[in-house]
Image (cartoon, rainbow, N blue to C red):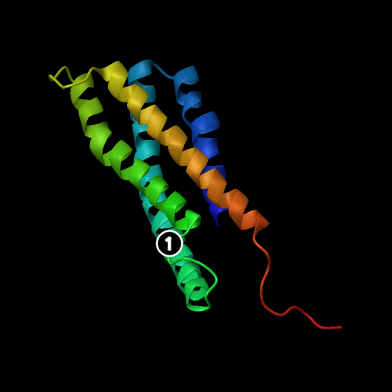
Amino acid sequence: MPGLWAGALLCIALIATPAPFATLVQADAGRVVARIFAQEAWLSIGLGGLMLMLERRAAAEAAEAGQGSQFTLGMGLALLALGCTVLGYYGLQPMIAAAKAGQPTALGFAVLHGLSFGLFAIKIVAVTALAWRAARAPVTGSGPSS
């Protein structure tokens, strides 16, 4: 699942958001991209919450077996991705909209946009690290016996 999440984030960053700016006037492209990021925020909250629950369960089982802490790197990465989503979309996007509308903001549009971009990049790195860890995890359970 983290691999699908990472793939979705990379598709948004590399394909879905540049395409409107290449084909539409800037105002229309901005509205399309804003809609894409609104949907991505809900997706990231859902997947991030699910990943956090799965990581928490695995960490609790490992700690109960005496094999680790109840807080793991995977939980930290999921929390980082969730934090970037909340701060980026729910914190910065309203300020970006206000700056675009000409309302006074503490920071200008370019700075706010740069901060939003940076948070999205950090989220991509965190989710990609989750996917990499999941791909490397040993498969547990019993398989078909011969």
| Image quadrant where one finds the C terminus | bottom right
**Helix, strand or loop under label 1:** loop
Q: Left or right of 118: which side holds 135?
A: right
| Image quadrant where one finds the N terminus | bottom right
Q: Position of residue 111 (x, y in %)?
A: 30, 19
Q: Nearer the viewer, residue 84 or 100?
A: 84
Q: Residue placed farthest to the right in the image?
A: 146
Q: Residue placed farthest to the front in the image?
A: 66
**Is 91 situated above or below 117?**
below
Q: Residue at x 51, y 39 (%)?
A: 125
Q: Left or right of 132: which side holds 96?
A: left
> What residue is shown with label 1?
71
Q: Is residue 32 visible?
A: no
**Is 70 situated above or below 127?**
below
Q: Nearer the viewer, residue 122 or 26?
A: 122
Q: Amino acid at mark 1?
A: Phe
Q: Position of residue 68 (x, y in %)?
A: 51, 67
**Is 115 situated above or below 47?**
above
Q: How many marks?
A: 1
Q: Residue at x 49, y 56 (%)?
A: 74
Q: Left or right of 62: which side holds 70?
A: left
Which of the 4 quarters of the picture holds residue 11? top right
Q: Residue at x 71, y 80 (%)?
A: 142
Q: Position of residue 40 (x, y in %)?
A: 40, 43
